Image: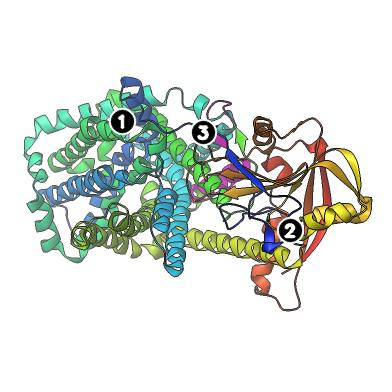
Amino acid sequence: MTENDTSPGVPEASSAPAANGHAAAKPSRVTEFGADQPQHEAPPVGFAALLGVLGVVYGDIGTSPLYALRSTVEMVSGHHAVQNADVLGIESLIFWTLIIVVTIKYVMLVMRADHNGEGGILALTSLAQRVTTDMKMRLILGLVGIAGACLFFGDGIITPAISVLSAIEGLEVSVPGARDFVIPMAIAIIIGLFSMQWLGTGKVGTIFGPVMLLWFGSLGIMGLLEVLHHPGVLFAISPLYAIEFIIQHGKVSFLALGSVVLCVTGAEALYADMGHFGRQPIRYAWLFFVLPMLVLNYLGQGALVMNDPRALANPFFFLAPHSMQIPLVILSTFATVIASQAGISGGFQVCRQLIQLGYLPRMRIVHTNAEEEGQIYLPDFNRFLAVGAILLVIAFRSSDALAAAYGIAVTGTFICTTGLCFIVFRKMFHWSVQAVCATFIPLMIIDVTFFSANALKIPDGGWVPLMLGCVLTLMMTTWKRGRSLIVARQGQDSLPMGSFIARLPQSRTTRVPGMAVFMTATPDFVPPCLLHNLKHNKVLHDHVLFVTIQNLDQPEADRGHRVMVEELAHDIYRVVLRYGFMETPNVPRALEDLKANGVDFDPTQASYFISRELITRSSVPKMSHWRMALFMFMARNATPATEFFRIPMDRVIELGVKVAI
């Protein structure tokens, strides 16, 4: 079981030797096997793969034209009248942000750092920790990864709120009286979106690809038509206009960067979803379709604003002819729902990873597809996201107001990713110090500048993701600390396994037919539930398995190394089941593989013994009162171990154990 379980946890070592030097009753025989996870292969770059990439990866960044340019121009217009030169400068800033942040940083650089084919902030953190030997630095890197994950959760809450609001606000262009209905309609759509999650991404997303293909095609066509009418906007491709805008407007240009960065919201999804599609389909889709369509649309909006200042109210929807504005609102609503779905599904994955890594208590995980391990649904986490998104819609009431909160979450994740890349590219890819600094210091300066510009918006809403990130980080570190104290305490109070095995032949313990599976966090010590069983029932089964779940700091267990079996005595085995942070444990299924190694395991006859801990405060507490209260609250609300590890309820025996920390 995992370190955050109510009894067993994660062993520190990668194997389980005999404890404390005590001799076992017979020489140990250790075997490793298990190949239930296929090796990652590069998916083919076909039309179907590219269509899937459009539907899942690019939903968030693809809906940014709804609000990015409008928010930036409105911010500048609040300080002075917007001139055509200002629009060209803003367009230039958006264009080069797309090129530098997405194309150069993520597509060309970050996506090279895959962990067994997987991407994302936690996979990058794992890579950085693997190539770092200093324990203090490993701890710092872990905190950076946790901070990035927490900001990603903030992004997952804000994305549905701002995306759906921005789409529904398009109604005001054609139907000015619809303003009073924007908030109720947005809330209804968000409730419907989160209510559908139990169906699974596979069913909900069957039309994602075609809809996003139509969406991006519409973006490009609308923008191209306006650019053809006013080709002068193409001068914005020159970085000189961005530089001139920054020099001339000083503080105002710095404030504008806080809105410009909204054009790259969702850039982290390119890296996070790499395990689902492979890097090549994501790269090809971006370079040859998504990027050109986005650039054309942004340029088209700029050309429209330069020609007709009245379009400032909502340049995206004014790009479309009046007769097409209602259909565009409908299409944009579908697109924003898809963008939100991508963030929700990513949130489910990150939440499961944090559970497996021991930073969050167990939650119920529902597999919505029997064939796809990655298609999961977490009801508790889904409710958390839904309530958060609805509260944001009610509190901020417009996409422009929410833009302040959005920027902090996005830029904070960017900083965490760039910081981890310093370590990975230096030690894993063996880049020289000069090459690493020349590449990532400029990128870090850009990320910090964007973050600083958004930091000025903290009083206006930027505090939301920061507060959420701080609270979640506190909860995660508290849970990790509490579980480590429990595992350490169990090691102090338990009987070494070697001593138990050595004394067993001379004991008068009655052996009864059957198979007993004792779940334990400390494989070198006798689990408390076994000692309590001997104390009260005074029997031991003929066949005994001591099972420990070992969570790895990699996406999946290596091929052939899922299960480690060590024979401690006749018909008594120590079993270590290894799972990566992208996997969900299934103990009965893993134990069935023992038959191939000569262990007679019958799942219909096995009885599972689990310790149910009663956590109390020790006389010399190692946690403050408030953190102890928080830890105990999280422990009480954790999903039962039997459900999380898919152990049949009718085959479980729980025995109470008191643990003082």
Image quadrant in which you'd find residue 263: top left
Spatial separation of the CA atoms under disc 2 and disc 3:
33 Å
> What amino acid is labelled 1 in the image?
Pro
- Answer whether labels 3 and 1 touch (C-beta < 8 Å): no
Q: Is residue 84 left or right of residue 61?
A: left
Residue 587 at x, y percent in the picture: 67, 39
Spatial separation of the CA atoms under disc 3 and disc 1:
23 Å
Residue 327 visible = no
Which residue occupies 47% across, 57% down? 146
Query: Within 10 angstroms of label 3, few (less than 14), some, or many (20 or more) residues?
Result: some
Residue 303 at x, y percent in the picture: 14, 39
> What amino acid is labelled 2 in the image?
Gly
> What amino acid is labelled 3 in the image?
Gln
The residue carrying mark 2 is 498
Tag nearer the camera, 2 or 1: 2
- Answer whether labels 2 and 1 touch (C-beta < 8 Å): no
- Answer whether labels 2 and 3 touch (C-beta < 8 Å): no
